[in-house]
Amino acid sequence: MKKTIRVVVSLFLGLGAGFHAASGFAEVKEVRIAEQFGIGYLPLQMMREKGLLEKHAKKLGLGDIKVTWSRFGGGAAMNDALLSDNLDLASGGVGPLLTIWDKTKGNVDVKGVSAINSMPLYLTTNNPNVRSLKDFTDKEKIGLPAAKVSIQARTLQMAAEKEFGAGKHEALDRLTVSMKHPDGVAALLSGRSEVTGHFSAPPFQQQELQDPKVRKILSSYDVLGGKSTFNTIWTTGKFRAQNPKTYRAFVAALKESMELINADKAAATDVFMKQSKSKLDPAFVRKIVMDDENAFTMTPRNTMKYADFMHKVGALKNKPASWKDYFFPEIHDLPGS
């Protein structure tokens, strides 16, 4: 009997919450946002540093909201947190976004809110015998954020297919191991680990290349045929529908964050140093932030190439007709791809 009462009460509370949200009376008072490691997350770090979400929430009449930030080592764990309602907005590479869009299509309906950058990802090695993908042997391991599902893993599969031939996209998967970027750097630079390759992101790849024993094997820009989105941010259809003003505030805050970064990249570097507690040389980081290869933009670039590839190899059941299928409408006016 008590169990039945609890179920009824839970249903009632759930319905009540849905009613109030739909009526515009009960938007969340706390927004939980997650980032990962690296310069690619500078737009979110700028947002946190300047209190931009709080600012735009007030502009839209939401009053004071609490913004809780967390950091994850990879997109897979972040997706788990999002689906278990322990997170409102997740961020990461295009691969994890497409994976969760595909899995939740027609139910939870996770989609991208926006891109947050375009950046090249480098595969580096400390093995002098490795000059191309064909030179990796079973004696070595390649570190990347999440084996088989991270954007680095998908880019490696695309590169492997180009190198080894159609249907051979998994040729190097057996060598990959999941590692946070800082751990991958430590392993590669130590020279004492079985990890002799690392597919990472700024500033970690540039940090590795300062060591004369480390070389770049390939860049994601080479694989994708031009500038391409590295990181995006995504949420559930439910969060967007039940919190329309909060969602609008977030999009506005992200736009202002981009404007601040692009107006003064030197100052933006200082924000990264502070927010990430980086011990790197500020001049070294500033050079990366100001590099023309790296762009802070909300426009998705070359994301459909990942989608087409992932569908072709069976990683996606649903084939998107356009990048707009897996991004919410608020950025559909941008020249995405």
Image (tube, grey):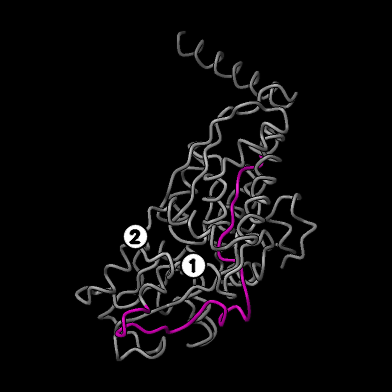
Question: Which residue is tagged 1?
Answer: 286
Q: Is residue 224 magenta?
A: yes
Give the image quarter of residue 266: bottom right
Q: How far apart are marks 1 and 2 (CA)?
A: 13 Å
Q: Does the magenta stretch include residue 30?
A: no
Give the image quarter of residue 331: bottom right
User: Going 60% across and 69% down the picture, which residue do you hit?
Assistant: 306
Give the image quarter of residue 260: bottom right
Lateral position of residue 215 relative to residue 315, left or right: left
Q: Where is residue 231 in the image (x, y as percent from the top left)?
A: 56, 60
Residue type at mark 2: give it.
Answer: Lys
The circle on residue 279 is 2
From this view, report whether residue 337 is shown above or below residue 246: below
Lateral position of residue 173 relative to residue 65, left or right: left
Outermost residue on the right side: it is 333
From this view, report whether residue 27 is shown above or below residue 265: above
User: Going 62% across and 75% down the picture, which residue do you hit?
Assistant: 227
Q: Earlier in the sequence, mark 1 or mark 2?
A: 2
Residue type at mark 1: give it.
Answer: Arg
Report crowding for label 2: few under 14, some 14 to 19, many 20 or more residues within 10 A (C-alpha). Answer: few
Lateral position of residue 156 relative to residue 239, left or right: left
From this view, report whether residue 105 is shown above or below residue 222: above
Outermost residue on the top side: it is 1
Secondary structure beneath label 1: helix
Q: Nearer the viewer, residue 250 or 308?
A: 250
Q: Nearer the viewer, residue 215 or 108?
A: 215
User: In what quadrant of the picture does the C terminus appear?
Assistant: bottom right
User: Going 60% across and 78% down the picture, which residue do you hit?
Assistant: 224
Span shown in magenta: 209-238
Q: Where is residue 98 in the image (x, y as percent from the top left)?
A: 59, 59
Secondary structure beneath label 2: loop
Q: Position of residue 57 (x, y in %)?
A: 66, 34
